[in-house]
Amino acid sequence: MAEVASAAGVSSATVSYVLSGKRAVAPATRAAVESAIAELGFTVNATARSLRTGRSSLAALIVPDIANPFYAQLASSLQEQLRASGLHVVVCNTGADREEERALLAEAVQQRFAGVVITPFRLHPEDLDTLAEAGIPAVVSADVSFGAVDLVKPDARSATLQALQRVTANQRRRIAVIAGPRDATGGDPRLAMLRRLAPQFGISLPRELVVRGEHTRDSGAVGFTELMSRRERPDAVFCANDMIAVGAMDAAHDLGVDIPGEVALVGHDDAAFASLVRPRLTTIRYPAHDVGVAAAQLLKERLDGRTAPRTVRVRALFVARGSA
Amino acid sequence: MAEVASAAGVSSATVSYVLSGKRAVAPATRAAVESAIAELGFTVNATARSLRTGRSSLAALIVPDIANPFYAQLASSLQEQLRASGLHVVVCNTGADREEERALLAEAVQQRFAGVVITPFRLHPEDLDTLAEAGIPAVVSADVSFGAVDLVKPDARSATLQALQRVTANQRRRIAVIAGPRDATGGDPRLAMLRRLAPQFGISLPRELVVRGEHTRDSGAVGFTELMSRRERPDAVFCANDMIAVGAMDAAHDLGVDIPGEVALVGHDDAAFASLVRPRLTTIRYPAHDVGVAAAQLLKERLDGRTAPRTVRVRALFVARGSA
DNA sequence: CTGAAAGCGCTAACAC
DNA sequence: GTGTTAGCGCTTTCAG
């Protein structure tokens, strides 16, 4: 910048002002500076700028697994939204491990990121305190409250009601669930929602029809097989996410169980592949794109000065296809 | 840091050395500093460090679309590999647009990133010059050479041979291709490879059996429909990627064309969903994980001082499933 | 409308 | 084994 300044015969302050437009510069001066910039191929150093201004142009997105299509979609959407504000997105995988989640939050502080968007998996609310102390805005995407931070919260009530309606409409009464791990933050909210709403249909979720595992295809196959070994088999299975549901389909195929004939199958997320499997997967869509939009919005508001925490709800959607 | 120093009764240099371990510090001093750090909840400012040392702890990954499972997998793998070197990954989508690609390279310079890994889509080799001028190492993942930069290049020859073998084994002679866009950087190397190898099987790829489109499901459906309207229909279709192949399956279903009975279908990539569709998709796997590993390796070598460009080949793999 | 200069927080000579 | 200090490249008062 000093080089540009001397080449243009001005001070470095003027170069800075030409770049930022924060104060009026005489057209002739501006032209001189701009041609010097072009001449020298000068590019501002964002690091120095950040150090000086105290604000970074980077935001972190912390998710369990970016290879999971849901999070990939979220990353894409967030990145697209923040772009307009000049923010870049640093994507961080935790592998669903709490220590990793904590380590990445610490990293975010160290990097003085402009903000953090996190989908906690095993994180505890107090783990976010480090961000608060460092004055870094956090946006949490989760079903459960997470203290006094901005929250993007899915509203799955009506979609879950519709799913239950659909499943019970043809006299299915033995509803099973392949849930996520017990020690996830806030438990498994999708399971919780089912438990809460099932009584409206005069059914309950007996303990022997709830199995747990990771959010993986394998885990779905194992869970489904286990459920089919019960004395009284379920006639419908809800899965905590679509990968699990696909695993369940694998197992059903191996066991010769007809879907949806013998067992109706419902997933969660509406991952891109949900409409590719046969039968097509009936599922409850969690709108990754909308989550990204909402998170970006909340973050931008914070950077614009809002201080009171805010919660945005995004509606889940029941998507009826062939599996239920 | 000054605060920590005075709390511990030492100079800020000592605090820095305790943190970096770059020179011996008396145990007692170290202890004092460490407790002061803990007391005050101090965290180094990575921005200031970067400015001072001239090296950033951030690397950019520039891809057409992070929501595409192949790139999501690549991102995941790259991030995992670079983690050990203390590097974070900033993921950037270009939407397959050249101007975006260029803009993001400029951004990478502005941010003084430690390195850039890019999967160019419409980029021209000379667009990388800005990086070179700024002294930022670039690793390109592409089929075509890209000037004097590090390259991760797929080796699809043997996998493509196997695919052709499989398809021609049962007397299929009319091979069609649904290729990517004509203006992509380096054309469509997958199509080129097929063209090169087909003669070995005594067949050619007639012009009327090559259609082009984007790398999307819709585009696959359109392309397949178009191919089926030819006077002499093809009996095998190669698709530039798996999304296209899935679209082709959609169209085949609508048209009542049996796969693989009437038409054999081969994809490229082996995206996660390839094994989910029915029939399961026969495809040529591009190992996203290996690409990430290789790219990380090349980048690390550069940061360790290597100056001569190097190319790493990663082998594609023929995956025979039900569609061909 | 423009310039001089302080200082963001850190690292790395250089000195003791 | 430790301290002093000069910047890294920028933004932003304050002064003209």
Image (cartoon, coloured by chain):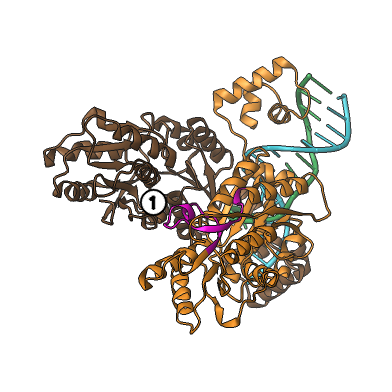
Chain colours: A brown, B orange, C cyan, D green
Q: Is residue A17 visible?
A: no
Q: Residue at x 67, y 55 (%)?
A: B116
Q: Quadrant of residue A237?
A: top left
Residue A132 location, x and y as percent?
45, 37
Q: Is residue B59 visible?
A: yes
Q: Chain of mark 1?
A: A
Residue A33 appears left or right of A315: right
Residue B216 appears left or right of A318: right
Where disc 1 sits, the SS reads helix
Q: Quadrant of residue B310?
A: bottom right
Residue A57 location, x and y as percent?
55, 53
The residue singled out by tag 1 in the image is A298
Determine the residue located farthest toward the top in the rendered image. B28
Q: Residue at x 56, y 62 (%)?
A: B64
Q: Closest to the observer: B39 or B54?
A: B54
Residue D2 appears left or right of A152: right
Q: Is residue B282 magenta?
A: yes
Quarter of the picture holding the N terminus of chain B: top right
Residue A180's place in the image compared with A169, above or below, is: above
Q: Closest to the observer: B12 or B218?
A: B218
- Dot 1, crowdedness within 10 Å: few (<14), some or many (≥20)? many
Q: Is residue B185 magenta?
A: no
Q: Closest to the observer: A316 or A23?
A: A316
Q: Residue at x 47, y 64 (%)?
A: B260
Numbered circles on residues, count:
1
Residue A74 location, x and y as percent?
44, 52
Magenta region: which residues?
B266-289
Q: Amino acid at mark 1?
A: Leu
Q: Residue at x 38, y 47 (%)?
A: A246
Residue B174 location, x and y as percent?
56, 75
